[in-house]
Amino acid sequence: MEIGKQIVTYCKYCNKHTPHKVKIYSASKARGLAVGTRRHNRAIKGYVGSVEPEPKKKKLGKKQVVVLTCTVCNKSEMRTITFKTRKKLEIKR
């Protein structure tokens, strides 16, 4: 699925339709010093067997999330583009 670099859509802060810059949302990496990560590392240290759950089947697609930034007020909001799942989202040149 392709989407333009800039789309005109509703801005809830300006209360009207304005041009928005489009950027694909990417989640950040897991934190290495989080409590769950430290607990997991402590559990798998040494010979304790498996503490991992069974591997899940991989999904064929996911709901694509984009970050829309208003060019008038520079406020950002995250929005899913479609209600269907897609494998990949590209921004047109």
Image: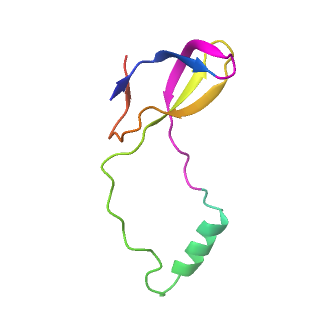
- Height in image: 29 above or below 2? below
Q: Is residue 13 magenta?
A: yes
- Height in image: 19 above or below 32? above
Image quadrant where residue 5 sits: top left
Q: Position of residue 20 (x, y in %)?
A: 55, 17
Image quadrant where residue 11 sits: top right
> Coloured how?
rainbow
**Quarter of the rendering occupied by the C terminus:** top left
Query: Which residue is at a point 39% across and 45% down the rendered structure image?
Result: 62
Q: Position of residue 27 (x, y in %)?
A: 53, 44
Q: Is residue 26 left or right of residue 60?
A: right
Image quadrant where residue 88 sits: top left
- Height in image: 88 above or below 30? above
**Quarter of the rendering occupied by the N terminus:** top left
Query: Which residue is at a point 60% across and 60% down the rendered structure image?
Result: 32
- Height in image: 3 above or below 39? above
Query: Which residue is at a point 57% across and 33% down the rendered structure image?
Result: 78
Q: Nearer the viewer, residue 10 or 5?
A: 10
Q: Nearer the viewer, residue 65 or 31?
A: 65
Q: Position of residue 44 (x, y in %)?
A: 51, 79
- How many numbered marks have been drawn onto this rendered protein structure? 0
Magenta part of the protein: which range? 12-30
Q: Position of residue 13 (x, y in %)?
A: 69, 21
Query: Which residue is at a point 59% across and 67% down the rendered structure image?
Result: 37
